[in-house]
Image (cartoon, coloured by chain):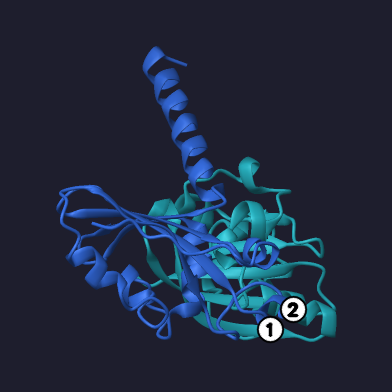
Chain colours: A blue, B cyan
Amino acid sequence: MTADAAAYARLAAEHEALMQFLYLAPVGLVQTTADGEILMINPISAQLLMPLQRDGNLVNLFDALADVAPELRHLCATFGRPSGMVCDGMHIQLDSGRTGGSSADKRATQVLSLSLLKLDGTRLMAVLSDVTHRCVAHPTHHDQATSP
Amino acid sequence: MTAPTLSFAAPDLHTSLAQLPADELDRLDFGVIGFDDETNVCQYNRTESEAAGLTPPRVLGQPLFTNVAPCMNNFMVAQRFEDAQDDGTVLDDTIDYVLTLRMRPLKVALRLLAAPDHAIRYVLVQRKQ
């Protein structure tokens, strides 16, 4: 194998490892435009958001969460700073029957945690996770939001 | 029937796939992920490997819904297989879905195949773009 071929093989292996690292991340990561259009998304995000999407067309984060967190678009639009946390660990309660997971889970209300970071004037980064079981264990936990 | 003539929507596709050798699975123009009764991946064809950017050694033997395709670990996909296995029923359904291959949202059709008389269950992936 030539030096170039070896370097290419090493880069390809590193790229594949990085790809798998992102595939396996146990939290949802989504990068969107300022309007919520999804630019990049990892598998856990799709796992959590697809059951909310009536038309199976997951293209906009704000649209995907419109029924359960309708204030999000406005929250981002009115965020005054050029960058920073729009919300940090905001709890979003889903209707029973919309949730993923097992049949037993479906009977319970699912709770998602959403953190939204404004990267700049054109991009947002969201972190999503399922905190249903944490909420059951700690029912007094309150939602948090960072004021703009 | 030869591999290239097998289409994503072909009837009785589960039986045809179960009889195909690995090299012919690789020639299919749709993604094939086969998994066993423990949900560990045992077949991963070239179309799926190239779309996901993962080579078979990283995927084969791994649990499908937690380590390979966690985006399908919800009631729309994983639960359908679990229910079919618990009830001993045949599953052959096609649904619209969005996968996150290479971290880009991609519209696909998923065909879900399971049957009590087949050891291997399948998720088939047809890209729409």
Instruction: Find residue A22 and report its horizontal and vertical position in percent.
Output: 48, 45
- Whole-angstrom CA distance, mark 2 to mark 1, is 6 Å
Report if the CB atoms under discs 2 and 1 are less than 8 Å apart.
yes
Circle 2 crowding by C-alpha within 10 Å: few under 14, some 14–19, many from 20: few
**Residue at the location (57% across, 51% down)?**
A26
Instruction: Find residue B36 and report its horizontal and vertical position in percent.
Output: 78, 62
**Residue at the location (54% across, 48% down)?**
A25
Q: Amino acid at mark 1?
A: Arg
Residue at the far front: name it.
Answer: A140
**Residue at the location (22% across, 59% down)?**
A33
Q: Which residue is mark 2?
A: A104
Instruction: Find residue A48 and report its horizontal and vertical position in percent.
Output: 51, 68
Instruction: Find residue B14 and report its horizontal and vertical position in percent.
Output: 69, 76
Q: Amino acid at mark 2?
A: Ala
Quarter occupied by residue A73: bottom left
Circle 1 chain: A
SS category of the residue bearing label 1: helix
Q: Which residue is mark 1?
A: A107
**Residue at the location (61% across, 72% down)?**
B74
